[in-house]
Image (spheres, helix red, strand yellow):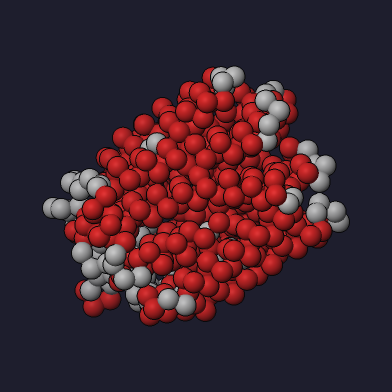
Amino acid sequence: MATGYGELLRVKHVTRLLVGTLVGRLPNGTAALAVVLFVRAEGGGYTLAGLLAAAYGVATAVGQPLLGRLVDVHGQPRVMLPAAVVSGLSMILFALVGTEPAPVAWAAVVIAGLATPPLEGGLRALWPSVIRHGDGVHRAYALDAVAQEVMFAGGPLVVMLLVAAWSESAALLVVNVVGILGALSVVVSAPSRQWRGAPREAHWLGALRSRGLLALLACFFFVGTALGAIAVANVAYADEHGDELIATWLTSGLGVGALIGGLAYGAVRWAGPPEPRLRLLAVALAAGYAPLVLVPDGVALMTGLSVLSGLFLAPMLACAFVVIDRHAPVGTVTEAFSWLVTTFGVGAAAGTAVAGPVIERGDAASGFAVPAAAGCAALLVLLATARVLAVPGGRTAPGGETQNDRNAALEPGFRSGHQA
């Protein structure tokens, strides 16, 4: 396993793109925890904290596919770098003004979310041009999902260390300045500057005209809901135990579990269509969320349950990347992947908005019941849409050529949606 990943990281540009995207996504990946801690430090309650975090998530959800569509048309540097600067500066303004005056605070949070650059979708669009063989692209998807979990595991720790060393506002400032630098590293790289989207059919729905993509996004809305609720419930659990640092261990534990699962998943060469495998992974993910409602007093045991809850998250994401490519219309690759980010954003916003009031009316155990229910809902969506997902919905590009056809090599014996 280590040898395969070592070979991948030695491919030119791979390490730079992974690290740059990871750092550039740090503000988005830590926003739920950072905003909740900052608002609490300013004297706000869990409801206000959850609503502000939800506003950021919803704004990100709106901005990602719109910016992704612009990237498909105009290229990455001309869209992503200005977006990263605007997003970072807006969140820095929020850190400086606090929650009052309220209109300024809300506007800063919303603008920061809207301008969040679509680095995730952009990176997944770049892999076929950077890695020339199918096994490498397959492993890159898994490593991409793992890198995301590294951010979720290490990001909260970075935030808490900054809070301990300085303050909650300083954490927001530093994380967002670093995020701008990460985005800059990606967009000035040769693959990013040279990448161009394939010709696309003019359609106002863009990638959303694919029924398979819509089914997949509905599933991942509930996965996002689970993750958003867990972020707030972790803070509540830490408050009940009198130590804010516990929230970091729990959130990082989830990321560590996903990291382990993702590395193992990427080491296997999977055969057959990915859609049935995605359903099995959804079963495992839902089963992993259920034990969180036990909320044991032992922090070590609760951290272990957090690791278990994240074990199948990265594998499910890596599998979903292949499914998205099979169903996305040609010329919408960045937009399609950005819609996945949007789904997560909307779902996470719903999770944080629901979990805050639920916790205030009950306790941390009530908060952890939200991700347990959301995991079951995600599985039910995949079961209900099995027929839609069974038929790849991608389309052949003008002239009979195919765009970014990763899956012929990734899934031996099966043709991608762009060849169907």
Residue that appears at 49% across and 54% down: 341
Total numbered badges shown on the rendered structure: 0
As displayed, is residue 215 above or below residue 125? above
Residue at the right extreme?
101
Quadrant position of the C terminus in the picture: bottom left
* The one of 37 and 317 positioned closer to us in this rendering: 37
Residue 220: image location, x then y, percent = 45, 44
Horizontal arrangement in the rendering, residue 401 relative to residue 170 (left or right): left
- Using the rendered image of the protein, determine whether residue 151 is visible from the camera's viewpoint: yes
* The one of 175 and 309 positioned closer to us in this rendering: 175
Residue that appears at 75% across and 58% down: 94
Horizontal arrangement in the rendering, residue 114 relative to residue 150 (left or right): right
Residue 303: image location, x then y, percent = 51, 30
Residue 10: image location, x then y, percent = 29, 65
* The one of 25 and 173 positioned closer to us in this rendering: 173
Residue 47: image location, x then y, percent = 74, 38
- Quadrant in the rendering for residue 241: top right
Horizontal arrangement in the rendering, residue 396 relative to residue 366 (left or right): left
- Using the rendered image of the protein, determine whether residue 354 is visible from the camera's viewpoint: no
Residue that appears at 56% across and 69% down: 181
Residue at the left extreme?
413
As displayed, is residue 62 above or below residue 74? above
Residue that appears at 40% across and 36% down: 311
Residue at the front extreme?
165
